[in-house]
Structures are given as C-alpha cells and as structure tokens.
Image (tube, rainbow, N blue to C red):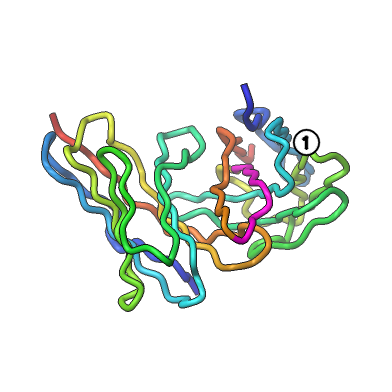
Amino acid sequence: DQQVKQNSPSLSVQEGRISILNCDYTNSMFDYFLWYKKYPAEGPTFLISISSIKDKNEDGRFTVFLNKSAKHLSLHIVPSQPGDSAVYFCAASRGYNFNKFYFGSGTKLNVKP
Amino acid sequence: DGGITQSPKYLFRKEGQNVTLSCEQNLNHDAMYWYRQDPGQGLRLIYYSQIVNDFQKGDIAEGYSVSREKKESFPLTVTSAQKNPTAFYLCASSPPRGAANNQPQHFGDGTRLSIL
C-alpha cells in the first residue's frame, strides 16, 4: 500500500510560468517531507524540505506548501526554466531515530522554451 | 568532495548468478540505504542500516542480501533468488536524525542492472 502518492505522472509548463507539483500522503504520523529532483541515469538530488510544524518553506524559486489536514503537499516553481525539466519525487518520513523515507512515484516535469 | 559512489554504473548478469553492487560514502553518515527504481514507479526500500554491523529489511528484501562491516560501505548482493532483478539501484546515506535536525538522504548516481 503506497503511503505517498503523486497522481500526475507528467506535467508540461511554458518557460516563465509557474509549475505546481502535487503529492498526497496517507499516514498522519509523517512529520518531515522532502522534494527531490532526478535527471535520467543519475541519483535524486535534494531540493527542499518542510517540517510538519510549518505550512510553507521557500528557497529561491522553489516553495513547498504543506496542508496537514488534507495530507497534501505541493511544490511551486516560479518562474519555471527549461533546466527544471526532470522527474520530481516527494518523500515523507516519521519521527523515528533515523530517516526511513517513503517515496512517491514521481512527476516528470517538462518546461518548454 | 564528500559524496556517495556507486559502482559499476552498468552491470550485466547471467541468469543464476549472484552480483554485488558497491556503495561507498565519505560523508561520515551513520545510516545507509538501498532502493530499487522500476519504470513509472517510485523508489522502493530494499535494505537499510543504521549503524555498522546492523541492518534491517525494507519493503522488498526478498532475493537480496547486504553487509555493513564498515561505516563507509554498504554493498548489496542481488542473488539468483531475485526473480526480476533488472532495475535501477540507488544507494543513499543520511546522518542520524536528531530531535530538531531533520536531514535529507543523499543519493549516489545509481547502478543499472540488466539480465543477459
């Protein structure tokens, strides 16, 4: 049973516009959420995270929003650039002594010039 | 430069053979992980290790084995018992999670295993 879900396998956006990637989770015990970016044949690279005590975290063009009541988080990229084209994974973990993460299936973002 | 090194990048295996994927990190991280990625799917946890000489099964451990004799190294063996071993394998590491210090996992660049 998948505890973290990304229901949109792909997203296409025009350069300069906003990209919004969505992620839903089922386990209310999750308290730490992350987004990773992955290029083909490479490992995921950490992008941005948010703790459950916050509802927003911003880093440059990237903002993650967390809605705990809806068990939903989203990643906003503004403005989108062609170099942002990649697969984006969301991940979640809960309050144990180490970081066991649960990953979504990924959303492939294509930013068109 | 600190990081995680996975080798080889591409690996081919004949049916019935065991193969070992290497993962080395110089980040001084305590925890290490192995994931498998299949097309259109997320990362699925195979094994993880919190400290040296200790490791735990993840969600899809059948047909795999690991060892953690050194902090820096966490090799994964894909045994002949793994029915569908063709996949992209990712190794990751992370420091211990403190009460107020959430830390992301850091990933290697992966090994693609194919069956001949």
Picture quarter containing residue B73?
A: top right
**Amino acid bearing label 1:** Glu
What residue occupies the far top of the structure in this picture? B1
What secondary structure is marked by label 1? loop
Q: On screen, A57 above or below A82?
A: below
Residue B53: x and y in percent read: 88, 51
Residue A1: x and y in percent read: 50, 74
The quarter of the rendered structure image containing the C terminus of chain B is: top right
Picture quarter containing residue B60?
A: bottom right
Answer with left or right where residue A16 lies relative to residue B81.
Answer: left
Front residue of A36/B110: it is: A36
Residue B76: x and y in percent read: 75, 44
What residue occupies the far front of the structure in this picture? B100
Q: On screen, B58 above or below A61?
A: below
Residue of label 1: B72
Answer with left or right where residue B111 lies relative to residue A37.
Answer: right
Q: Is residue B22 highlighted in magenta?
A: no
- Residue shown at 76% from the left, 42% from the top: B74
- Residue shown at 38% from the left, 53% from the top: A106
What are the residue bounds of the magenta stretch? B90-99
- Residue shown at 12% from the left, 35% from the top: A16
The quarter of the rendered structure image containing the N terminus of chain B is: top right
Answer with left or right where residue B14 lies relative to residue B100.
Answer: right
Q: Is residue B94 highlighted in magenta?
A: yes
